[in-house]
Image (spheres, rainbow, N blue to C red):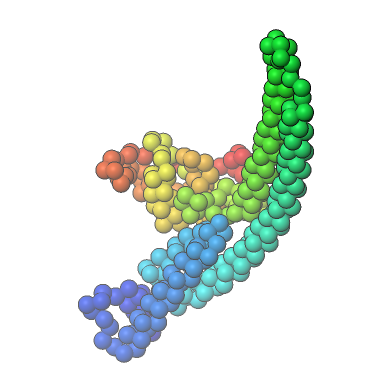
Amino acid sequence: MPIKQIKMFAEPSPNAPPEDPHLRALHTVVNCYLSTLETVANALGNSCPQIGGLYRHRLSRLRTRLAFDSSPQAIEESCDAVEVELYEYAKKAAAYVDQHGIQLRAAISVLEEIVRALAQRQDFYGTRLRQFAAQMEATAYPTDPEHLQDVVALQSAGLLSCVESMNHEAQSLVTRMQSELAAVEQRLSESEVTDPLTGLMNRREMERQIEARKGAGVQPILLQFLLSGRINDEVAKQVAARLGSQFRHKDFVCRWTENEFLVLFQGPVQIALSRAEQIVPWVTGRYALENGDNVEVEVKVHLVEAELVA
């Protein structure tokens, strides 16, 4: 069957299904495959967002491309790509879960130590307070007001010193606990590959991909998209959607900074530059916000060297 016919019926109108039974069967198979691809993408994204969000975005881009080109060659290539994506996802998700477990066990150990120290100090200060109480009960208070005031002032100073020491040590242990939790969160974030706002590749993963290319002796081809305008989270998400839709599945698209996106392009420099020039007008322009406002965004693109994007 000619490829042109396959493309024609990859996304047919529901009001005009193919009359030929073979074309109708092909239409059903292609649509089932696209539906399965979408389900797999969503499953990866939902099962482990810190890892799977990136793969959901990449598989969704692959599905969109296939909707326009469902030729046998494109479907075969997509199957190979999906296999690679699933393998990489499984590897990264397993590493993330293992790291998560290691960090949580380490954090629990530290927190248990802090809790034990806090309990010991509480017992210590509880004993001191009980001793103060016993001393106060056993004290023969003078009847002379001046001497009575001196005795009470001395006891009050002792109690205040005990309470202040108890509060200081408790606050110190709580601060240590907060620092440990923040450190664990930071260490876990280093294993994540997805930018939580846009669903694109995050900066750390892009840095790893760049270093992997360089380590393999391949000069990375990087396109730097610089945004100017009022770039809030809502605008950044829309820019990411437009930008991501314009690149192939095998091109890595990353949110590099708040107003900067980076693309690791797979192909010759000339094609990368030509593609970038075509994409800039699509990304530049007006973005509508949910509150009814409009934001004008200007985009400039540069070809940069890996050493210049640190």
Quadrant containing the C terminus is top right
Splitting the image into 4 quarters, where does residue 234 fall? top left
Q: Residue at x 53, y 70 (%)?
A: 82
The image position of residue 157, as x and y in percent, is 71, 21
The answer to whether residue 138 is seen in the rendering is yes
Looking at the image, residue 191 sits to the left or right of residue 72; the answer is right
Looking at the image, residue 170 sits to the left or right of residue 48; the answer is right
Quadrant containing the N terminus is bottom left
Q: Residue at x 55, y 62 (%)?
A: 48
Total tally of numbered discs in the picture: 0
The image position of residue 2, as x and y in percent, is 38, 81
The answer to whether residue 216 is seen in the rendering is no
Q: Residue at x 69, y 37 (%)?
A: 170
Looking at the image, residue 227 sits to the left or right of residue 206; the answer is left
The image position of residue 71, as x and y in percent, is 42, 75
Residue that sits furthest to the bottom in the current view: 21
Residue that sits furthest to the top in the current view: 146
Q: Nearer the viewer, residue 241 or 68?
A: 241
The image position of residue 54, as x and y in percent, is 52, 58
Q: Residue at x 32, y 73 (%)?
A: 11
